[in-house]
Image (cartoon, rainbow, N blue to C red):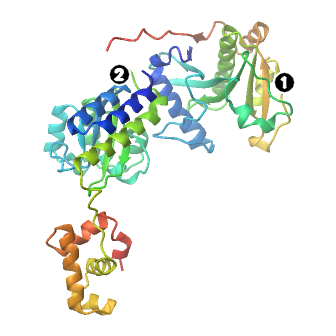
Amino acid sequence: MPASKIALDFIDFCEKQTDVAKIEDRFVATLNALGYEHIACASHVDPLRPRPGAVSIVNYPMPWLEHYSHGDFARIDPVFLAARIMTSPFNWDECLTKMRLSREQKRVLAEGADYGLAGGMTIPLRSPDVMPASCSLVAGPDGVDPLAMAHTLMVVIYGHGALHRRLNPNALAEPVILPPRERECLTLAGRGKSDWVIGELLGVSGRTAHNSIERAKKRYGVSSRTQAVVRAVFDAQINVDDLSN
Amino acid sequence: MIYIVSTENRQAFHHLLTEMHRHRKQVFIDKLHWRLDHNAGLEIDAYDSEDAIYLIESKTPRGEISVSARLLPTERPHLLGEQFRDLCETPPPTGPNVWEATRFCPAPDTPAGEPRRLMLGRMIAGIMETALIFGIDQVTYVADAALAPLARKVGWDVRALGPPRGKGRHKIQAFAARIDADGLRRVRQAFAINAPLIRFVPAEPARAA
């Protein structure tokens, strides 16, 4: 079957299917059909302890995943590191040789290669949750037709998006939007200012500043200012540059 | 040997094709700084399709590539017809018996000088052999100042399609080469090639899933 048909059928399937497990299976089957054998489409966390609500489809060999999890490799995995920096798909051989890697990081790559995880490609993904995410693909023995690249990207980006939507059905319905006053106060709190200083800077009372920040905390359902600031940064309500003096 | 990779058998050549696109990225983008797009380390353009015929020199279908080139049917969109139209004084030859050769790509680590010259010779012979099999009588191409005189010197029956454009090393010119058995003989002689170079390996019948 031509790659374009494989990809379009998958998208069609995602549109109609609401069962997450079925979409996950079809995601793997579709990428298998394009010639990929090993797939890891997930947030950059321990693959055996995925975050709730986060997409996590990993079919790497289980002994490797156990070893990876045991060694806490997610924290130093050079592929994750590169995926956070790169804005477009990259292949491991080309990209990772340009990075200055520690001995431990080189070990992660070498040991992964022993499990057949070599010569892969990674597609950085924009994930609406807090953790960065990516999809890594390693071709099977017959390789992948280079002309199928565009269809691979289509399947991965669409599939990841569809799964994220199904896993977080309310994400679009209830986005947090901070009113200007709360955003200003929270930004200044993020810069370490006290209620009184925030009040002085904005020309309001310390009490008003305090109440604004409390309301922002409530919107995010968190109990500390630090948590609220971090959430607001990840939600792009606060620009990280505005936190530096 | 030089493998012919076409729509009929490309399924058996995913590895060589991927490696070829990787070489093209390293040579044309990293080394020569051509303004081309790339993705995940592969240079693939709008003219790469199932209709293109690739000539890839390698010892095995999984081996390392020494040189590759792309042949495009001129009845479909091709570079001379779309990108380099201004290099031709009159409309360039097109039709079922005309191919366009592009993306001549020696491996990135090919030493300059003699090894490169021999490689080019083998690829010219490979293009001629393939063209003769497919009943092609003309091959058009755009060459830079270094390549243009060589093709003529080795006995390829070549005519310019227009005046050169650009300066010095960046001078480029469009050509049409005649394909016939005499020309192939001359090219083989010039490069001391004494046996056919090309090989066509049919793809295995699709396996049951």
Q: Relative to residue A113, is residue A245 depicted above or below?
A: below
Lateral position of residue B16 relative to residue A245, left or right: right
Q: Relative to residue A131, is residue A204 depicted above or below?
A: below
Which of A95 and B130 lies nearest the eye of the viewer? B130
Residue A40: % across, % down: 28, 38
Identify the secondary structure beneath mark 2: loop
Picture quadrant of residue B4: top right
What quarter of the picture does the C terminus of chain B occupy?
A: top left
**Residue at which label 2 appears:** A141
Residue B115: % across, % down: 63, 25
Identify the secondary structure beneath mark 1: strand
Q: Residue B159 carries which label?
A: 1
Circle count: 2
Q: Mark 2 lies on which chain?
A: A
- Residue A194 seen in this snapshot: no
Residue B83: % across, % down: 71, 38
Looking at numbered disc 2 in the image, what kind of residue is underneath it?
Pro
Residue A58: % across, % down: 23, 37
Looking at numbered disc 1 in the image, what kind of residue is underneath it?
Arg
Which of A79 and B196 lies nearest the eye of the viewer? A79
